[in-house]
Amino acid sequence: EVGADPFYVRFLIEDAAGELDVTSVGSAQPTGLGGYLDGWWARIRRHRPAKDLVGTLAAAYGPMTAPELTAVNPSLSNDPWESNSVDNVMQEISRFVRRVSGDQRPRFALAHPRLRGHLAQQSWVEPYRERLGNFCRGWQTLDSRYAVLYCAEHVAEDVVAGRVEPAALYELARSPGLRKAQRLAMPEDPAFPLRLLRRALGIASGRADILLVAELVLR
């Protein structure tokens, strides 16, 4: 019995369309979406470029371009002729990754929020959070919309995990240059930069840093 989870059933339907025996798939895999995804992951995790791509997208807060993905992961290449190029690796795992349109550069994300939610809980994703934090802290010198938009989220994660001091987040919150860059990157959402202040306020409040809380509120 596969249950009534439409996200899970979709994968079994696609397996059937690919001339796989759905009955054997249902019996060979542990019951439920989590078991199905874990079985899929066990088959691809030995392929470093695919693992790095999926792990990065599982840890990411939004879609990423191919140059951003290769900057975070040396195992991936921007050269379309290389087997480890982002496009070639995407083809291998196309069921689980989607291309996001709507701007000049194609961006990539995991195919469904449920998929990201499942993978993001896995312990092997943690190193990719650290990689993304290191990447995003260089937002000033990068041509990266992702780093501009989500550096606050990743630096806040690093603070909570003890990888960086809270001062790193407070510095971002004090940066008029970052707020301006975020407004330019997300003109349809003028309030987007307030997310950075909320993150910093949450950390400062938790540490009872009253003077800093007052400073951030006045901004």
Image (spheres, helix red, strand yellow):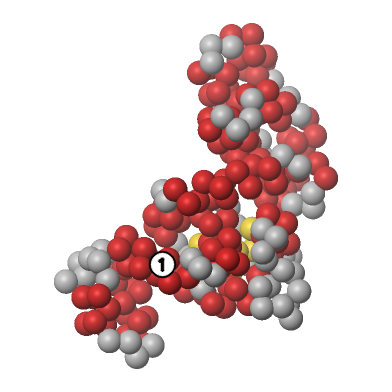
- Residue 193 placed where, x, y %? 66, 35
Farthest residue in the front direction? Answer: 46
- Residue 99 placed where, x, y %? 58, 69
Q: Quadrant of residue 91?
A: bottom right
Farthest residue in the right direction? Answer: 141
Position of the C terminus by quadrant: top right
Instruction: Work out whether residue 162 can be spotted.
Output: yes
Q: Is residue 201 above or below residue 147?
A: above
Residue type for callout 1: Ala
Number of numbered discs: 1
Secondary structure state at the residue bearing disc 1: helix
Q: What residue do we see at 35% from left, 74% from top?
A: 11
Of 20 and 126, which appears nearest the observer? 126
Of 113 and 103, which appears nearest the observer? 113
- Residue 34 placed where, x, y %? 32, 60
Q: Check disc 1: other Cα within 10 Å, few if <14, some if 14-19, many if 20+.
A: few
Q: Quadrant of residue 211?
A: top right
Q: What residue do we see at 42% from left, 51% from top?
A: 122
Q: What residue do we see at 25% from left, 75% from top?
A: 28
Of 117 and 180, which appears nearest the observer? 117
Q: Quadrant of residue 82?
A: bottom right
Please give left or right for residue 19 compared with residue 172 in the image. left
Q: What residue do we see at 31% from left, 77% from top?
A: 12
Q: Is residue 111 above or below residue 12?
A: above
Farthest residue in the bottom direction? Answer: 19
- Residue 15 placed where, x, y %? 35, 82
The residue carrying mark 1 is 42
Q: Is residue 89 above or below residue 149?
A: below
Position of the N terminus by quadrant: bottom left
Farthest residue in the left direction? Answer: 1
